[in-house]
Image (cartoon, grey):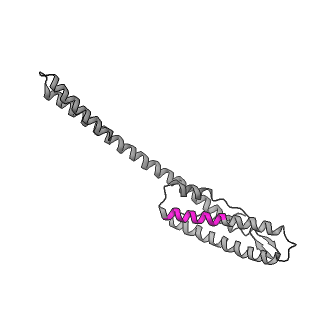
């Protein structure tokens, strides 16, 4: 809209100039005017094209960096949740660990992934956060060992945590597959 306003005002100024000056080389002024306008329009178009090209290259670089970091985070979470470093309470194994989906959240907020990938990343992040809540719940239960329903609460907590852990591991593999990532095979020893 501002370009149209400028063009209209230049045309009005050009017409006014011809009305005031009777003996002027109208064709010389007209060709200068047209070439100036064309230069401005072509320059603006080239600037827009260069800007769009730079933006797309920046987005590609950021997406590549996010995917590398996401691959590392997914590999680490998978490694931690598959470690086998469990604590046995009342003959039940518990993997007590907190996992933070930092890069997963950044990827979801970046705007560089398609909507389906973002939805899957958010779903995975929510499952990881829920697992952390379950760990907190377990730590609260452990402090109440003297209550009569302790073993029932412990069994339910064990079942829920194991279900969450296995779902997270499954979702990590699905997410890595959808985003064409190869997770690290190294294990903590």
Vertical comparison of 29 with 121: above or below? above
Figure quadrant of the N terminus: top left
Asked whether residue 179 is in view, the answer is: no
State the residue in front, 172 or 16: 16
Residue 124 in the figure: left or right of residue 154: left
- State the image coordinates of residue 27 (x, y, percent, origin top left): 13, 29
Residue bounds of the magenta highlight: 116-129
Tell whether 27 sits left or right of 79.
left
Residue drawn at the location 39% of the way across and 47% of the way down: 53
Q: Nearer the viewer, residue 69 or 105?
A: 105
Question: Residue 98 occupies which quadrant of the picture?
Answer: bottom right
| Farthest-out residue, left | 23
Q: Is residue 149 above or below residue 113?
A: below
Q: Residue at x 51, y 66 (%)?
A: 178
The verdict on residue 48 being magenta is no
Q: Is residue 15 above or below residue 77?
A: above
Coordinates of residue 56 in the picture (x, y in percent): 42, 50
Q: Is residue 129 left or right of residue 33?
A: right
Q: Position of residue 94 (x, y in %)?
A: 76, 71
| Number of dots carrying numbers | 0
Residue 83 in sight here: yes
Furthest toward the right, the residue is: 146
The quadrant in which residue 145 appears is: bottom right
Q: Nearer the viewer, residue 79 or 105?
A: 105
Q: Is residue 141 above or below residue 56?
A: below
The picture places residue 75, in percent across and down from the top left corner, at 62, 62
- Quarter where residue 97 is shown: bottom right
């Amino acid at each position: 809209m501002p370009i149209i306003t400028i063009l209209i005002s230049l045309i009005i100024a050009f017409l006014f100039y011809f009305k005031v000056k009777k003996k002027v080389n109208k064709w010389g002024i007209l060709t200068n005017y047209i070439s100036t306008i064309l230069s401005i329009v072509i320059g603006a178009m080239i600037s827009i094209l260069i800007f769009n090209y730079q933006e797309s290259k920046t987005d590609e670089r950021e997406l590549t960096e996010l995917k590398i970091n996401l691959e590392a985070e997914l590999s680490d979470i998978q490694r931690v949740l598959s470690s086998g470093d469990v604590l046995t309470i009342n003959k039940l194994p518990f993997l007590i660990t907190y996992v933070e989906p930092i890069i997963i959240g950044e990827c979801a907020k970046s705007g560089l992934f398609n909507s389906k990938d973002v939805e899957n990343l958010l779903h995975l992040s929510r499952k990881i956060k829920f697992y952390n809540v379950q760990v907190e719940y377990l730590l609260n239960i452990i402090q109440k060992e003297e209550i009569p329903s302790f073993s029932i609460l412990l069994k339910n907590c064990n079942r829920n945590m194991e279900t969450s852990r296995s779902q997270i591991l499954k979702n990590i593999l699905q997410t890595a597959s959808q985003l064409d990532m190869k997770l690290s095979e190294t294990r903590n020893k």
